[in-house]
Image (cartoon, helix red, strand yellow):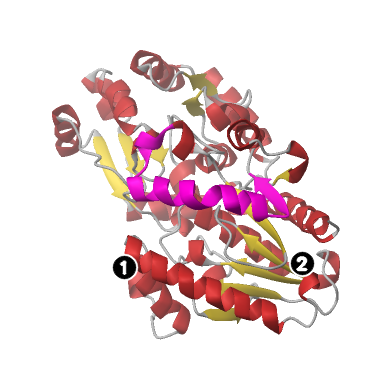
Amino acid sequence: MNLIINLEPLLKPLTGIGHYTRELARELTRVPVAGSGMSEAGEIAGLLGPRIVHLSSDHPLLGGNIDANNPPAAEAERPSSAPEGRLSQWARRYLRNGATRYLYHKATGLQLRRYATRQASPEEALYWEPNYVRLPWPGRSVVTVHDLSHRRFPEYHPSDRIAFLERHLQASLDGATRINVVSQFTSDELTALYDIDPARIDIVSPGVGERFFDVDTHQRERVRKCHDLPAHYCLSVGTLEPRKNLPRLLDAFLDQSLERQRECPLLLVGQRGWGNQQLSRKALDALEDGRLRQLGYIQDADLPALYANATLFAYMSRYEGFGMPVIEAMAAGVPVVTADRTATREVAAEAALKVDPDDAGAIRQALERLQDDSALGRSLREAGRVRAGHFTWQHSAANLRASFRHAMSH
């Protein structure tokens, strides 16, 4: 079996879908072909717009091995002479524009059809689309759906994204041989909203990298100095967009006493997404005073220590298909407070404090409990690490291969 993966999610600054695609593609290339459900003659290829590239574990877009003690240069400092570098730069600049995104998808679809015609045995090739909408493909395919927030909360998305998904997602689901989801919650959503037969769905949850479990003192000190981190802080990680519910978390944090805010400031990590995330006057004052900090996009190599140095982690998203930051924080040994709603309830299980994400008072009380109750903090640290241990990329890749085998036997 030959496998082709659409690598478009890797061409922009990585959000959850990009990390998911990269880590699973990396695992697929690391395992010997004979053990992956493919024939000895099989190959793994990546679709990059007008190009098809051979994928191996050391391909630049798969990131190689992340060395936390010697992090890579910032993306802006990396050479861009390679074709992947030039394409990545183009994608970052133009894929947010509807017209150029349309042209990119047309070119990508054309290349995929050409790849299909070159296959000696098209029925032995499988296309994996990790980002909702499959491109035209005559053979077997597997499509991954991460969440259905565009249906439940259309106000959390730009209108062109909703229009795109409404126009294409149903056909993508109908045409896929198998459908992957990242949680039981999303599986239930697919059945409820698109009437998908549960027998067609496979759960392939994200994993958490080993580097989050094993953060040494040197890494913690390097990151503390690099980002000028305070001795204690509350951390929140995620793309800054409406459904992440940042205003409610800020309300809860700013309702604490000034003394608490100064002793345990709130640090926000994540690139700006869609939507106008204007800070209130109180938040701007806290920003000037150092009680609130925005660190922006952080390199992968720094994230484990950023978590590990935190006093607590807060993730108050109103809607998630999974919620990767929750298990990353747990793996790093940080007590977590998260939303008792959608997939974060499922992912956190009994290893975190869970509260109503719309209740600022409940969020504030949870933040204060985790600062004051050291026994509770220790208990959640231990439970969280155990819970995170259930989610590994190796296990996720095994589930993905099983889905591929199921698709090929269809």
- Residue drawn at (55%, 56%) of the image: 133
Quarter of the rendering containing residue 142? bottom right
Q: Quadrant of residue 252?
A: top left
Q: Specify few, some or many for label 1: CA neighbours under 10 Å numbering under 14, 14-19, or 20 or more.
A: few
Figure check: 125 above or below 287: below
What are the residue bounds of the magenta stretch? 153-181
* Residue drawn at 59 percent across, 57 percent down: 130
Task: Identify residue for label 1.
Answer: 93
Q: Which residue corresponds to mark 2? A: 31
Q: Is residue 155 above or below residue 133?
A: above
Does residue 130 appear to the left or right of 38 in the view shown?
left
Identify the residue at image location x=43%, y=52%. Answer: 164
Assign a secondary structure to mark 2.
loop
Label 1, label 2: how many angstroms apart (C-alpha)?
A: 34 Å
- Residue type (three-letter) at the residue carrying disc 2: Val
Where residue 399 appears, as percent x and y from the top left, is: 76, 50
Residue 298 visible in this rendered orientation of the protein: yes
Q: Which quadrant of the figure contains the N terminus?
A: bottom right
Nearest the viewer among 182 and 385 is 182
Image position of 279 (left or right of 6) = left
